Image: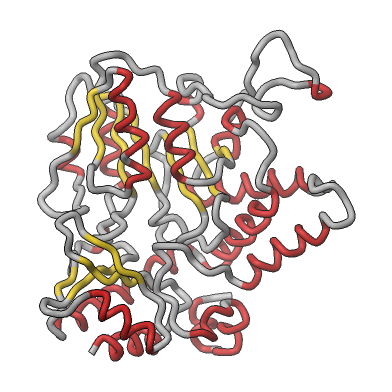
């Protein structure tokens, strides 16, 4: 299935993405609706559990297959993937598991989504200096900004792959290469790009992303990546039968963790969620993430120009091509953003309203590859 086929065959589009029968859904940066094949994969697994235990005979294949799909998605090895789930949980594991020393400092972005701020702020209680990166515009984190704000005591930098309001997509490779040369760990909250744009972990040490946004998977089914040579340094902070040696379910005298990223998976997996997560990633593979990214950049470009031409203020209206994300946020001076959202709802359009740090409310569009230009025109017409 290709993007061209989806856009050229409305019956196919409606079959694969049932949400379009209700109107344009332009809120994938929040919680996405499930494609039909994802919902059906979860349903099949759940129904199979009616006549057997929930850990059905094929669950081992499901777990291994999901891990392999996740590894391919980011260019990692399956042994570097932990199927942890929520981004907040994974980032908390990453922050709390490293061997911090008093006097270490970390660099994060204060106006990032809180999931990638709070776990790191909490390290102040352990004597870690938490520094906030200075940027010129909301969400616009550049490699040069990072390079100028780390020092010999910086042990880690954690950034979002794309800002959830401004839509600015960071140059992961450029930042990662620099930090690797300085032996500074690089952690990425990738939830706003995985499934929307290609992302490689070649120069990343740790990464986390749930599947419920651009990957169009279920909530609380996601991935945590830990580079192989970092795993020895990242101590698991949870303990259970799954991540520790537990032959025949018998307690052992020594706590011996699994030799790979499974060491971060303490207990039973969210199996129904993994069934959906795997199906979602297989859909992305079929369509092609690079093609999805190109389509999202095309959409953002012309919609942004239309909004500016109609008197709207757009966040990052024309970013460099390598920094284009899937999010487009805007407001119109003199018009309440909640009023704009009301107009959109009346036209059957699903969007969202978020607030900027200065209190300004903005409308946020985040269409995906299956959304058509006509749907976007409907949304623009509703705005007035």
Q: Quadrant of the N terminus?
A: bottom right
Residue at point 30%, 68% (across, down): 353
Name the colouring of the figure: secondary structure
Residue furthest right in the image: 51
Relative vertical location of residue 347 with respect to residue 180 in this rendering, above or below: below
Q: Which residue is at 53% across, 82% downward? A: 6
On the rendered structure, is 84 left or right of 348? right
Residue 160 on image: x %, y %: 32, 47
The part of the image, by quadrant, that contains residue 367 is bottom left
346 left or right, relative to 222: left
The C terminus lies in quadrant: bottom left
Residue located at (17% from left, 60% from top): 359
- Figure quadrant of residue 296: bottom left
- Percent position of residue 117, x then y: 31, 40
Q: Which residue occupies 23% across, 74% down?
A: 337
Residue 126 coordinates in the image, percent (x, y): 32, 19
User: How many numbered marks does the figure carry?
Assistant: 0
Q: Position of residue 279 (x, y in %)?
A: 64, 61
Q: Answer with the quarter of the image where residue 81 lies.
A: top right
Q: Residue furthest top?
A: 253
Residue 45 higher or lower than 222, as above or below = below
């Amino acid at each position: 299935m290709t993007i061209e086929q989806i856009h050229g065959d409305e019956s196919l589009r409606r079959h694969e993405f049932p949400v379009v029968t209700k109107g344009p859904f332009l809120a994938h940066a929040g919680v996405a609706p499930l494609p039909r094949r994802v919902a059906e994969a979860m349903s099949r697994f759940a129904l199979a559990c009616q006549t057997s235990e929930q850990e059905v005979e094929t669950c081992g294949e499901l777990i291994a297959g999901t891990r392999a799909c996740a590894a391919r998605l980011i260019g990692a090895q399956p042994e570097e993937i932990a199927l942890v789930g929520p981004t907040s949980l994974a980032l908390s594991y990453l922050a709390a598991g490293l061997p911090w020393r008093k006097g270490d400092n970390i660099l994060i972005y204060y106006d990032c989504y809180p999931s990638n701020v709070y776990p790191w702020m909490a390290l102040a209680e352990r004597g870690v200096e938490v520094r906030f990166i200075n940027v010129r515009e909301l969400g616009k984190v550049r490699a040069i900004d990072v390079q100028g704000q780390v020092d010999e005591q910086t042990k880690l930098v954690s950034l979002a792959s794309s800002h959830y309001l401004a839509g600015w997509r960071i140059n992961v490779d450029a930042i990662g290469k620099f930090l690797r040369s300085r032996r500074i760990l690089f952690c990425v909250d990738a939830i706003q790009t995985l499934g929307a744009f290609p992302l490689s972990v070649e120069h990343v040490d740790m990464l986390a992303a749930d599947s419920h946004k651009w990957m169009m998977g279920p909530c609380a089914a996601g991935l945590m990546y830990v580079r192989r040579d970092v795993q020895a340094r990242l101590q698991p902070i949870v303990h259970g039968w799954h991540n520790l040696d537990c032959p025949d379910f018998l307690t052992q005298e020594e706590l011996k963790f699994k030799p790979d990223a499974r060491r971060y998976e303490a207990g039973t997996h969210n199996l129904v969620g993994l069934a959906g997560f795997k199906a979602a990633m297989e859909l992305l593979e079929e369509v092609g993430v690079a093609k999805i990214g190109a389509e999202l950049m095309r959409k953002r470009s012309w919609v942004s120009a239309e909004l500016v031409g109609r008197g709207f203020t757009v966040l990052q209206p024309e970013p460099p091509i390598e920094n284009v994300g899937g999010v487009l946020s805007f407001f119109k001076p003199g018009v309440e953003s909640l009023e704009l959202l009301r107009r959109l709802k009346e036209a059957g359009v699903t969007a969202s309203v978020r607030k900027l740090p200065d209190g300004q409310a903005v409308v946020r569009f985040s269409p995906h590859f299956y959304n058509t230009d006509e749907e976007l025109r409907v949304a623009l017409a509703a705005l007035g």
